[in-house]
Amino acid sequence: MELHCDACLRTIVSLLLAIHLPPSPFTVGLRRSPSSSSRVLRVSTIQIEPYVMFEGSSGKPNVSFNYHTKPKFKGFIPDLLEELSVETGFEFDLNLVKEGSYGFRNNDGTWDGLIGEIMTGVADFGAAPLHITNRRKQVVDFSEPFMTVHATLLFRKPPQGAAALHIRSIHDLTRQREIAYGTLDHGLIIRAFRNTNDSTLVKMWRKMNQDRSLLTRSNEDGVERVRTEKYAFILPDTIGEYLSLRPPCDLMTVDHFLINEHYALALPKDSRYKNQLNIGLRRLQATGALARLRHKWWQGQDECQMTAHTSRMYSHDQGISLSSSGALLLSSLALLACL
């Protein structure tokens, strides 16, 4: 039967309205129906597991990836922006920082990396595991925190069968001589060691400062030493816990200490968006959404079939054991890779 023109148009419109278009692979924050009045904010970020990864991969970019294309992201930060989109009404265009760094101050007073893109207006704000420092606060503003970070000890798990010498905390670690310990030779952890007044931590820092071979140039170097030497690596718990939940399932974290730092969004000075983003972050904190996202991208990504609860039970009740030959062992348990 032949349809009149107006009937055809009504049919076409009805069909179009019934289609549920998938979210844009380039813009975060399209769960609700976008409107012409929605403001799209440009967001710069850093690719680091599990905060920002490439969709459809293990977290690494395809060999064909380049900064002139727009990848689709997954991870804690894209999910956080989705939640903030609902709370604030903003939409977010998420892009990788071209230099791939958080940013350093140049001799002329300018900054590169993530901080530089915020200062120059390339981005409306930055969303990454970026901790608040006094130096950064001089050139950008920070939002309410979305995550708290502590230091932790990273150890290698054992083969079965070990004579026990328990290490349940940093205090136990400093009372033994079989396991060396160290941290990254730059960054958040070592700055906190330099400034601490805690007697145990001062003792640890004095030992590391006297023997600089205990320090590493990168987190990767530290993790490799944990796996190949009698060595414990001190690093942020967000990194250590994620490592312990990933193949080859040979790592374990113990204790939380030294730092109580925060990750937050970074914005240009006096940004007009800061207040709305802070209101959204406070709502996400109050409703438990931030905690749920943390669980989703850490314990929820556990590939070693071990829960955080079991991990904590082991850490506090059993500790770390050393074999009689001095090899680092952890009592047998059913628990990555990152920057």
Image (spheres, rainbow, N blue to C red):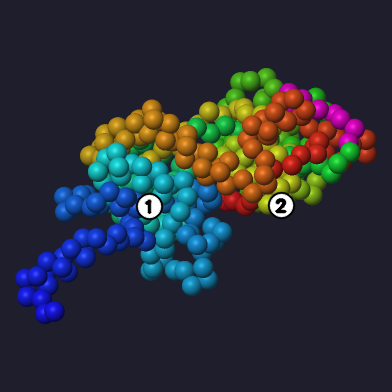
The kind of residue tagged 2 is Pro
Coordinates of residue 125 in the picture (x, y in percent): 33, 46
Specify few, some or many for label 1: CA neighbours under 10 Å numbering under 14, 14-19, or 20 or more. Answer: many
Tell which of 200 and 311 is nearer to you. 311
Image position of 251 (left or right of 29): right
Q: Is residue 309 left or right of residue 9?
A: right
Using a 10 Å C-alpha cutoff, classify the residue at mark 2 as few (fewer than 14 neighbours), some (14 to 19) or many (20 or more): few
Q: How many marks?
A: 2
Q: Tell me which residue sits at (52%, 71%) in the image.
A: 63
Q: Residue at x 76, y 39 (%)?
A: 333
Q: Answer with mark 1 or mark 2, whichever residue precedes in sequence.
A: 1
Labelled pair 1, 2 in contact (Cβ < 8 Å): no
Magenta-span inclusion, residue 69: no
Region rendered in magenta: 162-174
Does residue 205 sit above or below 52 in this rendering? above
Q: Can you see residue 48? A: yes
Camera-nearest residue between 147 and 85: 85
- Is label 2 in a helix, a strand or a loop? loop
Look at the numbered disc 1 and give the secondary structure of its residue: strand
Query: Can you give x and y, in whole percent of width and height, for residue 330 in the image?
Result: 80, 37
What's the mark number on residue 248?
2
**Residue 156 tag number:** none
Nearer to the camera, 187 or 67: 67
Q: Residue 235: give x, y in percent of width and height.
A: 62, 39
- Which residue, given by chain and number where applicable, does mark 1 sit on? 44
Residue type marked 1: Ser
Of the residues tagged 1 and 2, which is closer to the observer? Answer: 2
